Image (cartoon, grey):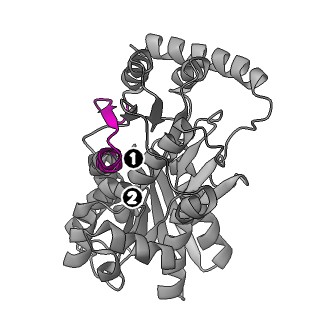
Amino acid sequence: MQHLLNTALASGALIFTIGAACAQDLTPLNSDSEPDRIDWSQLDATFGDLATPAQGTKVGGVSKTLTNEYWRTLGEGYKTFADAQSVGVVYQAASNEGDQLGQLSIAETLISQGFDALLFSPQTDANLIPALEKAAAAGVPVVNVNDAVIPTARHYVGNVQKDNGVRVAQWFIDNHPQGGKVAVIEGQAGVYAAGQRTAGFTQTITENGNFDIVASVPANWSRELAFNAAATILQQHPDLIGFYANNDGMALGVVEAVKSAGKQQQTAVFGTDGISDAYAAVRAGDLTGTVDSFPLLTGEVAMEVALRLIAGQELPRVVATPQALITKDTIDSYTTTDMDALRAVLTAQ
């Protein structure tokens, strides 16, 4: 299996080289710093109302996994917006967040099924390169949707990943002016979002000068691995004042380790994604906070972008979606099932 994956990725690297030669106007995408960008809230004002899609329009989506609530919710956003436009949508995902070859197979199958546009949320920055190039050759627009970044993607929808870590670091700076020891539980190696989130936290808290990052270890998006890593770190550094985890699943594993060590009053824990279990843990006082990147809204925006591309609009390369730091002090401002109300809150922030 690993041999097949290596072969597929090697093929992707070759296709990437050919594709890059044919698309010299594109530099490798850095979705956080790409200057050709627009905020999600400015689409209507800049490009006008979305035209009614042609009858029979259909969009395909491939995601990391449906075992993670974040990706299920993103798919709900796709379907909500597609249904409102009478557009067909198929949303599929790999069996788990490490099944790179399985995800590539799903994406290539969708390309063969004649969708008018495709939405890709790749496992890593590299594993869907072959599918992206096949879609481009077939003239099918592809939107790279949070959070790994395909270097040759022409269109990306998602939040500024580095800012996730910056927001958490700033909380520690504001709430622990004396500083202290902190640790990072990283996501999967080779995933743009994991690297950027970690970098945002690390750079911001290091520049403050009062904090010591005693550990920064990967847990591959796994709650169990995060628990084990956090338990070890707490044994080595019993005076630790906080953890930052690259997603909420891992953060909840860290919470369990902190509880087991009896460190709830001393050690803050932050995650990223804003899943419902994280919100519940914040309300219960177990999780200090999460950076919500609003997957339902992100899914709606990504579907809108796909439909605008189908209609022939020339959009910026990046459409930036919102995020917010959720703690016990801010949680009520973002707790709503009314998407219009949430859009209003996020537009105003």
Residues drawn in magenta: 75-98
Alpha carbons under labels 1 and 2: distance apart? 27 Å
Residue at figure coordinates x 64%, y 78% from the top left: 208
Residue 301 x/y as whole percent: 45, 53
Q: Nearer the viewer, residue 124 or 312?
A: 312
Judge whether 14 appears above or below 181 on screen: above
Instruction: Tell me what residue is drawn at x 54 percent, y 88 percent.
Output: 177
- The kind of residue on which mark 2 rests is Leu
Q: Is residue 80 magenta?
A: yes
Q: Quadrant of residue 274?
A: bottom left
Determine whether 340 is above or below 43 in the image: below
Which label belongs to residue 271? none
- Numbered circles on residues, count: 2
**What's the residue type where badge 1 is placed?**
Ala
Q: Secondary structure at mark 2?
A: helix
Q: Position of residue 3 (x, y in %)?
A: 46, 11
Contact? badges 1 and 2 (CB < 8 Å): no
Q: Quadrant of the N terminus?
A: top left
User: Which residue, given by chain and number where applicable, does mark 2 sit on?
Assistant: 297
Depth-wise, is mark 1 or mark 2 nearer the camera? 2
Q: Secondary structure at mark 1?
A: loop
